[in-house]
Image (cartoon, helix red, strand yellow):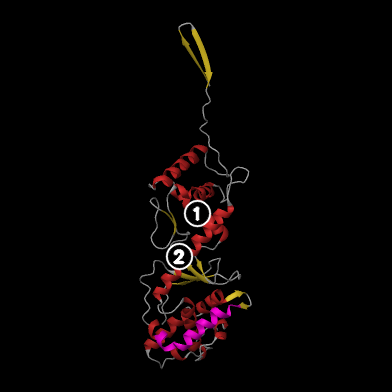
Amino acid sequence: MVVRGTYEDAEDEVSVTVESPDIHIPVDTDLDATTVKEYLLQYRDWIKVGDTYDSSNVLREGAAGVLEEWHDPTLLGNLNAQNDGVHGIYYTRGSDIPVSIVGADERKGLSFDLDFGAEHDDIYEPLFWYGISESGEFPQEDKYDLNYDLLRGWTDKQVAEFRTKMRAELETCIDPLSLEEFVVLAQFLILNATTGRNEVEADMMFEQPSEINDDQVYVPGRNSEQPTDLQDATTALLKFRDAPYNLSRGLFLLKSNVVDHQRLSEAVESVSENLEHYLLQAMQIDTADLSAPTRSARPERQVTVLTSCSIA
C-alpha cells in the first residue's frame, strides 16, 4: 500500500508492505486458513507457557499418528523380534494411543507425555502439522524442512520409556515373577490341567492347548466328583487357555521359526526351580493397582481381553 503525506508545500509518499494474514500450510487439510492460523497460535502459546488451549487434540492426534508411523506404541513383547502378526500385551485405556499434553490435556495412567518448552518445538511442530493434515501425513518436503532423524529418535525414545514403565507396572503386579516367567507358569498350569503335564520344559511353550469339549476331553479338575471350588477354578483357568501359548510366541520367537533360546531357557529354568514358591505367590496376585487393563492381542487387535493377570 502507498502512504502519502503533505506538510505545508511539501508532499511525499512511501510504499509500505503489509504482511498477508495467510500462513504457510505445508500439508493438505480440510481446515480453512483462518482456523489453522488460530490453532497454530494456540499451539505456540502453549509451548511457551503450558496453558490449557482448545485445540490441543490436534497435537495429541498428531503425536499418536507419528508414533504409529514407526512403532506399535503400546505393544509389549520381544523387542528383538522381527516376527509380525504374533501376540503381545497391549496397554489399553480407551481406543486411542495415550498421549498427554502437559498443562493442557493430561491423561490418567501411563501415557506419552509432551512437555511444554520452546526447546521441543523442532519436534512438536511437525506433530502439529501431522494432526492438522487431512489424512495423517508429514509436512511435504518441498514446503517444510522436516528432520526425519530427529522425529524417529524422539519416537524411539518415547516408546522405549513407555514400554519400560508398562513392564514395571505389570511386574509389580505379578512380583516376584518376570513377565516371561509368568507366561511360562500360566502355560504349565494350562497343560497340567488339560494333559497332566508335570514338568516345566521349553517345548511346552509352543504346544497349543486343544479345544476343550466336555464330551470329548476329560479334564480332571472339572470332574463332577471334584470339589466345587476346584471345578470353578479349573473352568476359570481354561477360559483363557490360548493366551499363554499366544504370548509365548510374541515373547520367545525372534522370527516365525527362530526361538529366542536365552530368554526362553532363563524363564523356564527359573519357574522349574521355584515352582512351588511361584504357585503360592500367584495365588496372591492382585490387579487392583494396574492403571489400565491389558490385552493379549495380535497387532491388528482382534483380541482376547485379559481383564486380570491372576492365575486360578
Q: Quadrant of residue 293?
A: bottom left
Please report the residue visible at 41 percent of the width from the left and 79 percent of the height from the top: 176
On the question of residue 189 being in view, the answer is no
Helix, strand or loop at label 1? It is helix
Please report the residue visible at 47 percent of the width from the left and 10 percent of the height from the top.
Answer: 6
Q: Residue furthest top?
A: 9
Sequence-earlier tag: 2 or 1: 1
* Residue behind mark 2: 92
Residue 254: where, in percent of width, then height?
Answer: 60, 74
Residue 227 position within the rendered picture, expressed as x and y whole percent measured from the top left: 37, 91
Amino acid type shown at disc 1? Ala
In magenta stretch: residue 82: no
Disc number lying in front (2 or 1)? 1
121 vs 205: above or below: above
| 290 to the left or right of 258 | left
For badge 2, the amino acid type reads Thr
Q: Secondary structure at mark 2?
A: loop
The picture places residue 238, in percent across and down from the top left corner, at 47, 82
Q: Of residues 262 and 286, which is closer to you in this image?
A: 262
- Residue range in magenta is 259-279
Q: Residues within 10 Å of mark 1 (few under 14, many from 20)?
A: many
Residue 221 is situated, as x and y percent measured from the top left of the image, at 44, 89
Q: Residue at x 46, y 64 (%)?
A: 162
**In the visual, does 181 lie left or right of 27?**
left
Quadrant of image for the C terminus = bottom left
Query: Disc 1 designates what residue?
Result: 63
Numbered label tally? 2
